[in-house]
Image (cartoon, rainbow, N blue to C red):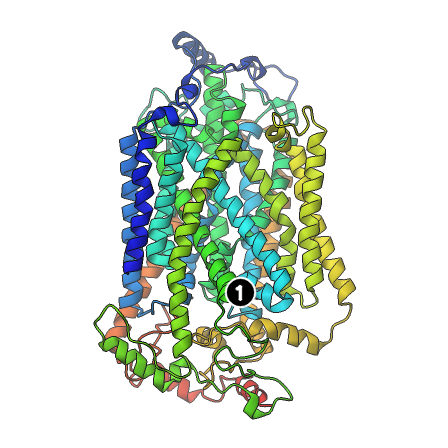
């Protein structure tokens, strides 16, 4: 506790130092007056007096369009976002949000400690007890996948390509989440004890491959944090007066790191719920304002889908690929190119991001699968509805004054959404956008910080820097260095370490610590588990420092992007080139036994190198080449980015498969079993995966921590979850990539009726998703807590009996090492006793085989 307080003090020290920068506008990287001065924009490129219908007939624009444009010419044209939010008000918002998040995080800690009796150990900090409900899993996925880019870049592509932009952003980034549910259940089947996907890479392919993929995992988190901070700082800088980029990035770092440090991964689940709920509420407020204008705001020229249609239909698209120059068509080459880039890049952002693997580990198998499916479908509503509303509203507002409200550079920075909020809702809209961006940055940023910390602890520090047993070989027990199992080994050479739940010495240690009231805990004396438990406690302290260092690193990262003038669109497009080469190799490591280390390395390095070469080669052919003046513009163009993304993922896939075949052409059933035994050996002896999943596998607890069922038993038990994941992935991938876009191609340009149907679909989806996200997680969590409290009253704690408390099935609580409860009066025990000998199919056989 004292360590955390000291670290929190360090968080707020830089904020105090940064006040000098805030109060000195001369030191800002960007002068706020530059945003308010008139922009030189050629309005004739967009202006038209006739409806763009895609037909030969000429129809004049509605009277409301002409009247609005005439009024705009009379009062003067508007340009840019005015930074009108006071610095003091913005700081108060940051402070209140940070305090609220810290309170929720502390509340989560109290619930887990006093209701579920979780231990404050390393695994609980990184997997939240391993039994998160469907609703909270879905909410967390929505929160993690809602980058600030989701709110800003989706509106940007809507303002560029029209109705196709929001769809390709939403559909092109939803299928990855649903497909990831397959990897989620495969990880629990092939490597149930793994906490990171990199542990699987290490177990199967060795040190070199592991370090390469660690690098790519860090790259992924780096790019995600880059997108978050660039977008967040741009919006804060545009809306808040006298706020420098340095101060903005520092404020974001403090909010992200503060509550993450207090509650670990578990706190992010609770805070994510409130963040996501608030995001949906704010989005619905903006939707109601644009399409209904309930308060008759004179600054709002809309109020209905028909009014929005009238203004957009009289505004020409500057994308030559849009059929007829209309924003109301799916025939948009620019939108399609963006869709392909979006699909490819987001596969890398999901598959190679430890944050999503962590959410998978935190839930039970079937709950995790449904959590990813519902999370993906609920998330679809955010970019689809928000961008359809805000992006089209931006086009309508520009049409209403007869001139664009933003320059192309400002649109690329993601300022379309803040501008619409400011124009339509005034001060309320500005605060709404500040909260939206703050919620998005805080939720995703905290997940990324936890992901980086878990990689550092599990895959770097624990593996290479300070391993508990540096001479440990594959298949050996980390506690006693004896082999866990294996043919040809005599019984004396095999591990006989008891499970921590059945260890009498551990019970004595727990009682000593319960009686101790001092700040310093007594040393553990258990001859089997004592040293390893203290080692894990030391790692828990390192986790706190990892969170601090990672969070502080976001500040120079953000300023680096500002110095290079990298905008949101550039960083978003570049993601796929850098990391999509790892998508197929990562999938193969979990699914395909024949994959080899050589194939994995060839795929990830070959794909990345070829993707970068092809990207820069094409960009160099554009006017200006790759000179410093034109580098960001030419390298950020859509065609070079498209080529780089496609080459990266295709070469990565082909190289990994072909090289694996060449280096391992044939593989027997015994070889396959031996390969997956490497991943099944990934385990924590203090919380073995058999203990975590014993209810799902329908098992009795064995005497040794490494006694486990056969792979065939695990596959059979998890088959329903696997079939659910595969079925959902196929159905929704076909729906979002083939059926829905194909049906839209049957319509040339949307007429008024078609536009009304389109906007109604977006709004209905948002209302349904908001209802699910707000109601289901809250109901499930409250119900689980109430039932656990009732269970605690019926079975009072008695730490002298055993280490594992009874689990309320409704709460699905399978946390690792806890205070114990008296099971003698548990009615569920009679059912277990009656079916004893029948529920352990394949389990006892494995225990016998371990002695062979």
Q: Is residue 489 visible?
A: yes
Rendering coords of residue 169 (x, y %) = 55, 40
Rendering coords of residue 599 (x, y %) = 71, 60
Q: Is residue 33 above or below residue 351?
A: above
Residue 601 placement: quadrant: bottom right
Q: Residues within 10 Å of mark 1 (few under 14, many from 20)?
A: few
Between 139 and 207, the residue placed more toward the observer is 207
Q: Is residue 653 above or below residue 481?
A: above
Q: Residue at x 71, y 50 (%)?
A: 606
Q: Residue at x 46, y 76 (%)?
A: 685
Q: Is residue 413 left or right of residue 124?
A: right
Q: Is residue 61 left or right of residue 72?
A: right
> Residue most toward the top?
74
Q: Residue at x 31, y 57 (%)?
A: 4
Label 1: state its secondary structure.
helix
Quarter of the figure that contains the N terminus: bottom left
Between 851 and 162, the residue placed more toward the observer is 851
Q: Is residue 692 left or right of residue 106?
A: right
> Residue most toward the left?
517
Residue 852 placement: quadrant: bottom right
Q: Is residue 331 visible?
A: no
Rendering coords of residue 225 (x, y %) = 48, 44
Q: Label 1: which residue?
A: 464
Between 384 and 189, the residue placed more toward the observer is 189
Between 817 and 328, the residue placed more toward the observer is 817
Rendering coords of residue 414 (x, y %) = 48, 31
How many numbered marks does the figure carry? Answer: 1
């Amino acid at each position: 506790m004292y360590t955390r307080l000291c670290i929190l003090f360090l968080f707020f020290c830089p904020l105090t130092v940064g006040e000098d920068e805030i109060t000195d506008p001369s030191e800002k990287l960007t002068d706020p007056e530059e945003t308010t001065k008139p922009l030189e924009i050629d309005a004739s490129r967009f202006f038209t007096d006739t409806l763009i219908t895609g037909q030969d007939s000429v129809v004049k624009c509605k009277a409301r369009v002409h009247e609005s444009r005439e009024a705009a010419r009379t009062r003067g044209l508007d340009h840019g976002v005015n930074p009108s939010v006071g610095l003091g008000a913005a700081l108060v918002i940051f402070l209140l949000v940070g305090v609220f998040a810290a309170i929720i995080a502390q509340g989560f800690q109290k619930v887990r400690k006093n209701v579920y009796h979780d231990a404050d150990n390393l695994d609980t900090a990184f997997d939240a007890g391993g039994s998160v409900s469907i609703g909270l899993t879905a909410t967390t996925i929505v929160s993690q996948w809602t980058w600030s880019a989701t709110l800003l870049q989706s509106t940007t592509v809507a303002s560029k390509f029209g109705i196709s932009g929001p769809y390709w952003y939403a559909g092109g980034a939803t299928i990855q989440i649903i497909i990831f549910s397959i990897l989620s259940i495969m990880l629990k089947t092939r490597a149930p004890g793994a906490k990171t996907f990199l542990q699987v890479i290490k177990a199967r392919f060795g040190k070199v491959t592991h370090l390469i993929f660690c690098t790519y995992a860090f790259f992924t988190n780096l790019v995600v944090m880059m997108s978050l901070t660039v977008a967040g700082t741009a919006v804060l800088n545009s809306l808040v007066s006298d706020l420098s980029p340095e101060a903005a990035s520092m404020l974001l770092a403090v909010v992200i790191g503060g509550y993450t440090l207090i509650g670990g991964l578990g706190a992010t689940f609770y805070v994510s719920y409130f963040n996501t709920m608030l995001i949906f509420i704010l989005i619905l407020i903006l939707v109601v304002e644009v399409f209904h204008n309930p308060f008759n705001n004179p600054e709002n020229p809309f109020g209905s889908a028909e009014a929005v249609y009238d203004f957009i239909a009289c505004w020409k698209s500057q994308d030559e690929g849009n059929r007829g120059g209309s924003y109301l068509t799916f025939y948009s080459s620019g939108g399609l190119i963006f869709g392909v880039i979006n699909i490819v890049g987001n596969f890398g952002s999901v598959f190679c991001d430890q944050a999503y693997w962590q959410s998978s580990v935190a839930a039970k198998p079937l709950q995790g699968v449904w959590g990813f499916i519902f999370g993906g479908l609920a998330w679809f509503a955010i970019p689809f509805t928000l961008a359809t509303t805000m992006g089209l509203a931006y086009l309508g507002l520009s049409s209403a004054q007869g001139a664009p409200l933003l320059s192309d550079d400002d649109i690329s920075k993601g300022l379309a959404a803040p501008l619409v909020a400011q124009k339509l809702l005034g001060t309320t809209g500005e605060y709404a956008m500040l909260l939206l961006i703050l919620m998005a940055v805080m939720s995703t940023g905290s997940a990324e910080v936890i992901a980086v910390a878990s990689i550092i602890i599990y895959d770097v520090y624990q593996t290479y820097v300070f391993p508990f047993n540096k001479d440990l070989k594959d298949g050996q027990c980390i506690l006693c260095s004896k082999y866990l199992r294996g043919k040809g080994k005599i019984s004396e050479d095999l591990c006989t370490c008891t499970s921590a739940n059945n260890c009498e010495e551990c019970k004595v240690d727990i009682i000593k610590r319960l009686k101790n009231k001092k700040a310093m805990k007594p040393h553990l004396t258990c001859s089997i588990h004592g040293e390893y438990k203290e080692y894990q406690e030391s790692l828990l302290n390192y986790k706190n420092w990892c969170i601090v260092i990672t969070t502080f690193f976001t500040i120079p990262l953000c300023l680096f992007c500002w110095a290079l003038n990298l905008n949101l669109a550039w960083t978003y497009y570049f993601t796929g080139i850098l990391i999509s080469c790892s998508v197929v190799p990562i999938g193969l490591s979990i699914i395909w036994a024949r994959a080899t280390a050589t194939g994995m390395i060839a795929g990830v390095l070959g794909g990345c190198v070829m993707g970068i070469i092809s990207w820069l080669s094409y960009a160099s052919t554009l006017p200006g080449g790759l000179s410093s003046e034109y580098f960001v513009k030419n390298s950020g163009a859509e065609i070079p980015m498209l080529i780089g993304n496609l080459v990266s993922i295709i070469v990565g896939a082909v190289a990994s498969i072909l090289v694996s075949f060449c280096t391992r052409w044939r593989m027997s059933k015994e070889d396959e079993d031996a390969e997956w035994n490497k991943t099944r050996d990934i385990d924590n002896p203090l919380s073995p995966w058999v203990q975590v999943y014993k209810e799902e596998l329908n098992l009795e607890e064995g005497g040794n921590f490494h006694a486990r069922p056969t792979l065939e038993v695990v596959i059979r038990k998890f088959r329903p979850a696997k079939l659910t994941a595969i079925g959902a992935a196929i159905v929704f991938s076909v729906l979002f990539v083939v059926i829905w876009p194909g049906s839209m191609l049957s319509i040339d340009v949307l007429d008024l009726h078609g536009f009304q149907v389109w906007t109604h679909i977006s709004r209905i989806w948002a209302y349904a998703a908001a209802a699910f996200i707000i109601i289901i997680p809250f109901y499930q969590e409250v119900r689980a807590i109430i039932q656990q409290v009732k269970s605690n009253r019926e079975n009072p704690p008695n730490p002298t009996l055993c280490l594992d408390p009874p689990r309320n099935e409704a709460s699905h609580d399978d946390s690792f090492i806890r205070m114990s409860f008296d099971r003698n009066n548990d009615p569920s025990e009679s059912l277990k006793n009656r079916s004893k000998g029948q529920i352990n199919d394949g389990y006892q056989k494995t225990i016998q085989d371990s002695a062979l």
